[in-house]
Amino acid sequence: MRRGIFFFLPVLGVLLLLRAPVKTGAQGREGSAPNYLEPGNSGASLIDTVNAQNEFRIGVQVYNRYAFNEAILAFERALSFRPGEPLVLDWLGRAYYRSGLEMTAVRQWQSAMENSRSQPEEILLRSRIEMVRNRRSLLTLMDEGLRFVEAGHFPGKSDRGVFFRQPVSVWPLEDGTAWVTAYSSNELVRIDINGLIRQRVRGPVNGFDRPYDVVQGPDGRLYVSEFRGSRVSVLSADGRWLAYIGGRGLGDGMFVGPQNLAVDGEGYLYVVDYGNRRVSKFDPDGNFILSFGKRGWDFSGFLSPSGIACLDERVFVADGVSKQIHTFDKNGGYIGVLVSEGLNGPESIRPESGGRLLVADTTRVLLIDPDSAVVRELGMIGGSRVRITGAGSDSNGNILAANFQGDEIAVMTPLDDMASGFFVQIDRVIADHFPQVTVELSVQDRRRRPIVGLDGKNFLLTERSRTASDQTFLGAAYLSSRSDISVVMERSGETLMMRDDLAAALRDINAAGSRLVSLISAGETPVRERLGAGNSALAAAARGGNYSPRWRFDSALRLAASDLLPGEKKRAVVFVGSGALGELAFEQYSLSELAAFLTNNGISFYAVTAGGGPVGEDLRYLCEETGGRVTDLYSPAGVGPLIRGISARGSGSYALSYRSSLQTNFGRDYLPVEAEVYLMERSGRDRIGYFAPLE
């Protein structure tokens, strides 16, 4: 129907459709719509121009409905009428990118850059190409040789007043904020990604008494050690005071100047009792279990215990005087010295992703491998007033360091990330209620990690180089507790005998709280199972399907992931199977294409295995690349924590709205919009366009 409208426009209407501002100067029309369909540009006929415009409009519309394959076909048809048009090539690259075909996308963007008639567009395309080409890893692990530099500071005071005094410890949260213990101002403050204080907590009625360290348990509760109060305060996840643990004294469960804290995976709390030169262990209810660290036949005793961390079945404790890090088991049994030299004065230890230890060591931050004892300096803080008493890695890959003497929180960022900036992608433009326009976009770093914690102050929307009117920050996905999942059930000969296991898995997955969007039977021809209400209906759906040795994993995964695109931004595909994917697993789509399709659309992948067989490396690869993980159906914790973790994951998806001031030519003109993101010394931008509704 839309094609007909365009084909039968009168000549005046066609000329209005094709009009575009005249390019001025060598820089081109900064921020304006590219001159991509003027008849004189390529020598194409008027009818070819109209046909190209029709196909391009269709491509943009279906792209915004997540129909990327249809968009690719429409943009290819547009190029058949007008070869080499840079804007069409740009959109074609976007569609390939969202489909997981990254190298094909890069080729389209390269061609668009070579044909570009606008220097700003060329710069933007070159930046995007380099970012995609240079991505080395999707993991949140710290690369070998990575060097961190100071990217910014959150000062404790300014000419506007005092915000906090003498920060000791930092505990980063999934939403991009971080709890900070302020020793001299006797409070716990929560700081956002821009250094603004979002919350102040001063403890019970009588207040904190020199808060020193803060950690969070698996159940979300916060523990705050009070050095002068000789106790540990227990708080809810939102900072409400609940109870005390311990008190001043020399006996079991008592403290003299408690400092650093750690919590293991089971929720047991470990407290460094500085005055008594020991470590005390408590159960999740606050009951005393044991203490260790005194002189014995195998250990000379602590001189000045400081940092502590739990990792796997080991407890690591630093000694500031001997400048060593010691290893114990969870029962306090001494294992040995982890690091005996090269430390200046270790103050805190935090477990880091990848099974390593992040250590605050006076003026620098170290990364230590607990298996090899290799010590690597990540970065240091310069200046005359520096004493790093605590450091933690945040969800955006930065290190937040508490500079006690400098009265500030230093933000340390990987040097390569500083140079590359952000990868900003406008995912969708909604103009159904034009001139009110909604922009959905995602922000990542060069390793594909989502940048969480941004708010309206970090974004700027412009149209044709003018700041958009009435820009409003609508929300961020990282703040949402809702999530969507699609389940893929393996229908192989192996799982034919495990139908009860499949039913149990689907029941547990559905009970974990995420919205179940679809259930895909991965048979020879993957199909959506009909989901009914109640456990009996779910069990029937889980047991159903056609089982075949020629079952298809790749097409089933694509189908499940596509079902998630219109839903929540926190989303995941959960695969339930034997752990082996079979010979036809990647017949249509390669493993790397599937991983790119998931990550480029913000979808994580989880695998739940049954039957006790080995888990294939391909499944592990998909989990690692997308931020998911593998678990056994009958593991002690079950699948519930895995599914609930989907809602807790960070997401770099944001939504903003503005009021457009552009003329639409009755809905026929392509209207540009640009989004820029700023955070400290880093930035990124993307430019796209849309069509208003036809009038």
Image (cartoon, rainbow, N blue to C red):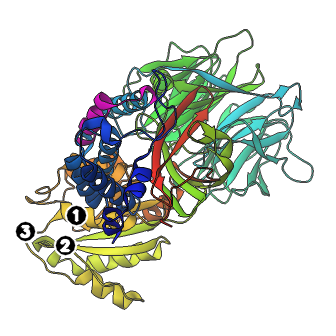
> Can you tell which of label 2 and label 1 is closer to the viewer?
2
Disc 1 packing (10 Å; few <14; some 14–19; many ≥20): few
- Classify 255 as above or below 17: above
* Residue 651, image x, y percentages: 51, 51
| Sooner in the amino-acid sequence: mark 2 or mark 1 | 2
Does any portion of residue 167 appear in the rendered image? Answer: yes
Q: Which residue is mark 1?
A: 612
> Can you tell which of label 1 and label 3 is closer to the viewer?
3
| Sooner in the amino-acid sequence: mark 1 or mark 3 | 3
User: Is residue 191 found left or right of 679 in the rendered image?
Assistant: right
- The amino acid on which the numbered mark 2 sits, given as a three-letter code, is Pro
What distance separates the C-alpha of mark 2 from that of mark 1?
Answer: 25 Å
Residue 572: which quarter of the image?
Answer: bottom left
- Classify 232 as above or below 359: below
- The residue nearer to you, when weighing 84 against 107, is 84
Is residue 111 in the magenta section? yes
| Sooner in the amino-acid sequence: mark 3 or mark 2 | 2
Report the predominant secondary structure element of the magenta stretch.
Answer: helix
- The residue nearer to you, when weighing 135 against 536, is 135
The magenta span reads 104-120
Q: Which mark is residue 526?
A: 2
Identify the residue at horizontal 83%, vertical 33% (top origin). Answer: 164
As helix, strand or loop, the secondary structure at mark 3 comes to loop
As helix, strand or loop, the secondary structure at mark 2 comes to loop
Disc 2 packing (10 Å; few <14; some 14–19; many ≥20): many
